[in-house]
Image: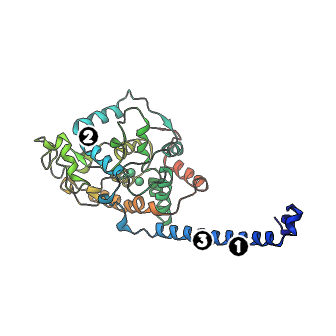
């Protein structure tokens, strides 16, 4: 509003009241000071977020109760018996599979806040776009950008009949059927898992033998393993992409070096792929919040390139 208009709107008595005019001008000054302070605070917060250094991620010792409770439950309940029943349920020919495009799946997932994650409170669509954008920014191949975009879509399981809660959908993964490794997070909480006391499942190699190959391990049931099967059957993504999806939560293996005795020839290449993917999944969580609408056209095209069918069977 132009100054003349302000004055026009003002009661005549006030125009002649010099004190009132002075008060208005003081108020305007004050607003400007507040605006500058707000901008300063906003800039400082953005700078802090983007400078979050790598040692500040995955700090489980100091994580909140929500994260600790999540893992207590997951470690107690992920048994061989549960794993077999979950797989039977998900891969049974009788299961009615919802059909949705990749983008619809991303939108559906958006209401989920992951209880196992100490590093982000952003919605899942933003996490997926942050990962994909970080990969794209580094000039990585298009198949890898798409892998970043979809890698957590297995969390959709939570909305389907059969998932028991977040404990069988999200969080780090580990094999069942052999001893739980100390390098898993909160290793003591596995004591509550009945398999830990089982003479076979509790033994170092359990039901496996050294060199049996990673694809023969029965991984704890969750979003990685489930999405791997969906994508393997319905996309043209390469083997490295499938490994990135299947093992991205297997931190005890790809980060801590556990369970390596089970690797077979060929697994080294997959391990390197998973490790190359990990920083984009983890550290992009502190990047700027992406604009979903701006990025949508680029990613819709990318999805079409690797998924021949628009509607995916979930
Ligand atoms: O909390 C996170 C989250 O659930 C991720 O999606 C998963 O991949 C990670 O391994 C886990 O630690
Ligand atoms: Fe994940
Ligand atoms: Fe992720």
Please name whichever residue, 176 or 69, is drawn nearer the observer in this view of the structure.
69
Q: Earlier in the sequence, mark 1 or mark 2?
A: 1
Residue annotated with mark 1: 29
Please name whichever residue, 127 or 215, is drawn nearer the observer in this view of the structure.
127
Query: Do the residues under discs 3 and 1 have CB atoms within 8 angstroms?
Result: no
Please name whichever residue, 45 or 79, is drawn nearer the observer in this view of the structure.
45
Q: Quadrant of residue 11?
A: bottom right
Whether residue 266 is visible, yes or no, is no
Please name whichever residue, 179 or 30, is drawn nearer the observer in this view of the structure.
30
Q: For marks 3 and 1, give the one nearer the viewer.
A: 1
Q: For marks 1 and 2, give the one nearer the viewer.
A: 1
Q: Position of residue 218 (x, y in %)?
A: 25, 43
The CA distance from mark 1 to mark 2 is 61 Å
The CA distance from mark 3 to mark 1 is 13 Å
Q: Residue at x 80, y 70 (%)?
A: 21
Vertical position of residue 235 compared to residue 313: above or below: below
Vertical position of residue 260 compared to residue 28: above or below: above
Q: Quadrant of the C terminus?
A: top left
Q: Earlier in the sequence, mark 3 or mark 2?
A: 3
Q: Position of residue 61 (x, y in %)?
A: 29, 59
Q: Judging from the image, what secondary structure is the residue with disc 2 in?
A: helix
Residue annotated with mark 2: 77
Q: Position of residue 15 (x, y in %)?
A: 86, 68
Q: Judging from the image, what secondary structure is the residue with disc 3 in?
A: helix
Relative placement, left or right, of 155 versus 70 is right
Q: Residue furthest left?
A: 199
Q: Residue at x 30, y 53 (%)?
A: 250
Q: Quadrant of residue 8?
A: bottom right
Whether residue 191 is visible, yes or no, is yes
- Please rate how many residues cluster around mark 2, counting C-alpha atoms within 10 Å: few if below 14, some from 14 to 19, many from 20: many
Q: Quadrant of the N terminus?
A: bottom right
Residue annotated with mark 3: 37
């Amino acid at each position: 509003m132009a100054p003349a208009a302000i004055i026009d709107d003002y009661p005549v008595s006030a125009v002649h009241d010099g004190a009132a005019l002075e008060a208005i001008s003081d108020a305007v000054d004050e607003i400007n000071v507040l605006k500058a302070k707000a901008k300063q605070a906003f800039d400082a917060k953005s700078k802090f977020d983007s400078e979050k250094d790598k040692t500040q991620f995955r700090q489980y010792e100091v994580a909140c109760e929500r994260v600790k409770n999540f893992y207590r439950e997951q470690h107690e309940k992920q048994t061989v018996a549960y794993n077999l029943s979950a797989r039977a349920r998900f891969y049974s020919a009788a299961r009615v599979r919802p059909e949705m495009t990749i983008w619809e799946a991303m939108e559906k997932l958006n209401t989920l806040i992951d209880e196992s994650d100490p590093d982000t409170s952003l919605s899942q669509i933003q996490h997926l776009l942050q990962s994909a954008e970080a990969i794209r920014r580094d000039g990585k191949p298009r198949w890898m950008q798409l892998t970043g975009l979809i890698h957590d879509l297995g969390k959709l399981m939570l909305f389907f009949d059969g998932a028991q809660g977040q404990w069988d959908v999200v969080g780090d993964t580990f094999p069942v059927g052999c001893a739980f490794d100390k390098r898993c997070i909160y290793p003591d909480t596995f004591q509550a898992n009945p398999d830990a006391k089982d003479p076979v499942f509790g033994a170092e190699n359990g039901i496996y033998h050294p060199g049996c190959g990673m694809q023969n391990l029965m991984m704890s049931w969750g979003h990685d393993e489930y999405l791997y099967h969906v994508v393997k059957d319905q996309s043209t993504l390469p083997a490295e992409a499938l490994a990135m999806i299947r093992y991205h939560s297997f931190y005890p293996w790809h980060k801590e070096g556990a369970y390596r005795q089970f690797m077979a020839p060929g697994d080294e290449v997959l391990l390197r792929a998973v490790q190359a993917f990990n920083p984009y999944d983890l550290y992009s969580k502190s990047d700027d919040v992406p604009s979903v609408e701006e990025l949508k056209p680029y990613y819709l095209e990318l999805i079409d390139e690797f998924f021949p069918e628009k509607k995916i069977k979930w």
